[in-house]
Structures are given as C-alpha cells and as structure tokens.
Image (tube, grey):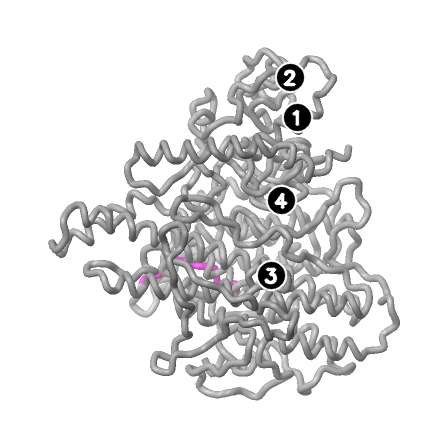
Amino acid sequence: MANKKSQKLFTLTNDVVDKNNIEEVMQQAITLELATIPTYLSTYYSINRAQDQDILYAKLHKQLSKSGMRTAAEIEQLAQELKLDILVYANKSAALIMSVAIEEMLHLSLACNVKQSFCQKAPDLMGIGKVLSFPAYLDGHKPEFKINTAKLSLDQLTTFLMIESPDPFTDPNAIGLLKATVDYKTIGQLYEKIITYIEGSTNPEPYKKRPQLLPPEETKRPRPYYSQNSINTVHYDRNHKPQFANTNDTAGLVGVHNKATAIEALHRIIEQGEGSTTTQNKKPHHTLQWDKKTKMAVPMEIIDGEDGGKTVKFLPGDYEDGGEELAHFAKFLEAYSLGGYYQEKFTGIDGLDDFFSYFVYNQATSPTLADYQATDGGNQALALADKLASAVFAYILLMIETCYHKEEDTQYNLFMFGIHKSMIWFLSEIGNHLHKYTFSKGGETYQGALTFEPYIFENHALSPKEQILEILAELSKVDSYWSDWGDNYFPSLPDVGLDHVVKKDIPNVPSTPYTHHH
Amino acid sequence: MSHLDKKELHVCMGLNSCKNQGATNSNDCAGQGYCSTATPHPCHTLNSCKGQGACGLFGTTEEFCHPGENDCRYQGSCGVPILASRFIAQGPNKGRSVWLLARARFEEKRKGLKPKVGPSPQPFGPTEEYVNALPGITNKITSSCGQSGNRSCSYINNPIERKAAAAARVSKMEQESKAKLQDTLSTCPKHAK
C-alpha cells in the first residue's frame, strides 16, 4: 500500500482552481473519471449473471438436505427461494454496475469536452493510461482511499460508495491522510471548484471551435453515439420481468461552446454521480454513514418488494435533478444493502456457503500480469489474454483521444466501429473468458481477471492495431479458442496510429461464425 | 460457395423481397422467407454488409428504430437473426418486439411494389427452437436465462411449468407490441434514404 501511495498519477501544488492550473485540474478530473472505469468493469466481469438455474437449485437442495432438519417440501421451497435470491440479485447488481460504468464513459467524454473547449487543449488519455494501475487512488480526494480491481463484495461496493459519495465522509478504515493536491472531499466538490472558476473566467465566448465528442449535427438520419441502456443494463425480477437500470431520457453528451455549456457538462457529471443538486443537496437523500462497531457502511432499510423479493426505499435526493434516474451513489447503496441482507440471510441457514460465492468468480484483488506470468503458479494463456485486454483498453483510450483530433465523420466511425465494438464486444469477451483460466498465488488458486495494466504501444515498432493482432496470434497458438477472433472480428477494428492518423480502409473481413453470447 | 451468396441479404424470417429468397430457398413470395440470409453475426457493428444489422440489444435509440436498415458494413445495431422473443433495450420503445418493428419497416418499404408481401411463416418471428431446427444451422443459438435479450425464460422450477410461463411471457410481449406498433413507429423517424 505504501509503495502504491507514492505512485501518484500526477501532483498539483495549489488548493484552488485558477488560470495557472485549470488545464492540469481538468486533466485531473479526466483521470479520476477514467480511473473508475476499470474498477467498475472488473467487478462487473466478476459476476456470473447467467448460470444454469437447475445446477444451482440442485446444489442448494443438497446443502439444505444435509442437516436433516427439514421436510422434503420445506427443502424444495427454500431451495427455490434461495435460487431466486441469488439469480435476481446477481443480475440486478451487475446491471446497476454496468449502468454506472456506461455513465462514467459519458462523464469521461464530458470532462474531455470541457478541457478541449474551455482550455483549448486536447485531453491526454494515453498519458493517463501509461501510469494508471491498480490499486489506484483518487488523486486529491480527502480522505484518500484505495481503489482495487476486485470481485463483487460488500468491501468493493463500499469503495464504490466512497467514490460516488454525495457528502464528505471520514473513512474509518483509513491509515492516515496523505498530502493533498487540489483538495476535494467528494468528486462533486472538485467539479464545483472548477465550475466556480469557469463562472468567473473571462475567456472570449463562444470558445474557439475544436473537435469534441458529439453526435454529428447535420445528418439526414440522427446518429448519436450515446446510449443509456443496453442488454447489459437490463435485469429481471423474480417473475422474470425485465427491468431497465437507466431511464430513457438520462442526459447524454453536451457540446461545450461557452461558459453556460461548460457548466452544464460539469453539472451533469455531479448530478448523475451523486444525486439531485437542484436545491444544493437539500433534498433528503441517503449519505455514506458508518457503523461505529463494524466500521462498515450503514445499509438502507430493506422492505418487501412487489415481486415477492426484497427492495429498498429511495429518497427524493437520491435521484438526478429530473427525479427519474437514480444517481450512482444510490444505485451502489442499493446493491450494497441488498447484498448485505442476503449475505446475512444465507449465513443464518445451516449448510450454505457465503452468499456471494454462489455467483461471483474467485478473482484475486488487483491481480497483476506478473502473477499470471509467474513460472510458479502462472498461466501462459491467461497472461496473453490479459495482455490482449490491456492492449485493447489502451487502444480504446487512443481511439477516444483521436476523436479529439478529428472531425465528425471520422469520429463517428471511430466511436461506433472502434470504441463501442472494443468495449462491448472485445473487452467483454476477454473479461468473461478469463474466468476459465486459473493461476495460483500465495498458496491460493484464483480465476483469471483483467488487470488493466498499462500497455505501452511505444515499446514496439508495429502499429497499435498490428500489436493487438500479434498478441492475438500468439494467444491463438496457446489456446485455439481465440483463432476465430483473429480470423474475423479483431481485423475489423479501425487502424489508428499513435499520431492520431486513421487509415481509411478497414480490411475486408470474411464471414463470421454465429455464436450467441448474450 | 454457399447457396446464400447470391441472395438478397436480410436479417430474418419474413423480411425477404421475393420468391425463394429465404434461408431455406423454398418460400413462395415476398415476406414469406423462413429465416435470415444475412451472414449470421452475434453483435453490434459486426455485420458484413449493408442491411445486415438487426437491433435490440446494443446500440442507440435511433439505431433501434431501424432493424436491418443499416447503410453499410459494420453499421448494424445487433445480432442476426432476430428471435421472436427479442425486445428493444433502450428508448421509448424498450421492452417491445424487435421483429415486429423490423417487419413493419419491411412492409413500409415494399408498399406498392411487386410481388406483394405475403404473411410471415410465424406472425411474430422465429423462436429459438425454430431457428435451431432449420436445415443447415450448424451453430445453434443458446440464449441464457439471466443476461439475455431473450424473454423466453422463467425461474419456475418445474420444467413444464417453466416453459409454459416463458411462452406466455413472450406471447404477452408480442401482443402488447402489436397493439403499440403504431406508437412505436411514430416515435421513430422513417428511414432517411
């Protein structure tokens, strides 16, 4: 921990935002938005959303039968109830985390738009990607706390609550505070400082036009980039009725052209993360409270749900300003509260395992590529697959960064056929498949998980896309599962250089074998 | 060369323009094909050609309005074929049938053209079992119950009751989607080209 704490992403020297540091502060904001994405994704990938319900039922039935205390009918009824607890919670917690991860991508873009337009400087995402590793720390946050890439647990959800907390808090588990940079006690406070500076700024308006990540303005058919929901944000209640984690009208991208739109973009980040801001957080809302005894976050009250399961009751300030969409903090507090409730319920029933163990893969906390490469306990296929994922993630950053150097049409192609495809398809596929590999460390055996370690394209002579294809070819030799991916899907990525030059032609890709993964 | 290579490419059952342009090469008329001729693909932006993207699972609200109407390679919204149980995951029409919208779009495009559009072999599109039973389908579709656009699922323990409940759920969605089809179309702009 001490070693990692010295690995600051960067250091600023002032406690205030002013004309001398606004560029760096915006880069700081971009860094913290970016840092949340791997941690949320790593936890998302740790959840098995679609396990075989009959196998799960049989396991629970067997465990409940061992005590000999229940009748056959009681065992059947309880096994079914517990199966539903597991399946519905697993699906819901995953959908909630993914819905937040999607909005963090939006926040990253909004912060980049503000830097590009207000500061007239392009965001440096590749620079962040070269140093961002886990565990990480939100630079300047008071208290500073560790952010891991880790499996779903109450501890990991507590970290998420600290990231998204709408109010200042004291971490009861903190060892001590570090020297601060630009101090803030919530992410919202950092953005409020930036907003205050922008409000008082005298930059000529409208700001000089530079490429931003925005939907094309003039097309016959609208081609927006941003989508609040996907099938990954859908979850099912106990009656298998679909629920949607994000509402339709959740605010999307904002073009930053002047003071008002810059403030609108930043304000959007605050309200989506922390909740209603219309009355300066005076609406009643849940906050991060700690149990003095256990030093755990205090959960929401659990009540009976309409589908026969359990639910929680929200307060008006738990939502965004529109009042329909739950803020990130509220979504995580719901997942934390229900998770705690079910964990306690399972603990109280003789013969059962830990609640989370039924649907969470056994990932190590903040694993490293070195763990996977270790001669003792490592796994070559896992190491190569993880390296591939890290390269894909770095390539996503390169493509986003390139959007800020290109005009609309190139942006659209890059976004849809590069960034979106890489996020929802390539990274997801690797993230899910890594669980099939195992490695050993410290006498324990774990399932593989994405490390999100920095991948430096500059270390090799080949172009970034060529490097990705080369890693894939190497991986395919070790595990033939990946052969189709090299033949078909990966070659369809746009070809983007480190100088942000995009090659025009995407190579022709032969027909793809059909496998339904969703 | 596959027998599909010279065919009109479309994304699902009942979306073909002419005789013998369904996947099984045996349909009598427009709109009566038994399955997609588009290269099957699993996800957003992985389609090989114009008109081969489906929709419903991944993509934007606007893309979800135009199943099978993508302008170019890689611009399709989602995987092919479109199963009857697939619903739209985003926008004002979320929760409604993708196939019914695709069929309505197809009928819209074919209006006034010959041959006339005939009834689809199945009124709400193909089921998973139907597609898997078609000749020549080597990669079977295996939708999962949890994370899936497949509404054809249930958590009931008894297999027979589970199947019945799942079928009833899909049927309800189909009927509701049919009743709201005009509303669905009204929220989506017509195709621009």
- Which stretch did the figure color magenta? A445-452
Tell me the kind of residue under disc 4.
Pro
Q: Residue under label 2, please give it.
A: B117
- Between the residue at mark 4 and the residue at mark 1, the CA separation in whole angstroms equals 21 Å
- Give me the residue at 59% from left, 46% from top: B90
Gap between marks 2 and 4 measured at Cα: 28 Å
Q: Are marks 2 and 4 in contact (CB under 8 Å)?
A: no
* Residue located beneath label 4 in the image: B92
Please state which of residues A406 and A454 is positioned toward the viewer in this rendering: A406
- Position of residue A353 relative to residue A429, above or below, is below
Look at the image and tell me in which quarter the N terminus of chain A lies: bottom left
Binning the other alpha carbons within 10 Å of mark 3 as few (below 14), some (14 to 19) or many (20 upward) gives few
Q: Earlier in the sequence, mark 4 or mark 1?
A: 4
Mark 2 belongs to which amino acid? Val
Q: Are marks 1 and 3 in contact (CB under 8 Å)?
A: no
Between marks 1 and 3, how big is the CA–CA gap? 38 Å
Secondary structure type for disc 3: loop
Seen in the image, is A81 located left or right of residue A129? Answer: left
Residue A47's disc is none
Mark 2 or 4, nearer chain start = 4
Between circles 4 and 3, the one closer to the viewer is 3
Mark 4 element type: loop
- Please report whichever mark, 1 or 2, sits nearer to the chain's N-terminal start: 1
User: Looking at the image, is B49 positioned above or below residue A415?
Assistant: above
Residue under circle 3?
A323
Q: Is residue A66 left or right of residue A450?
A: left
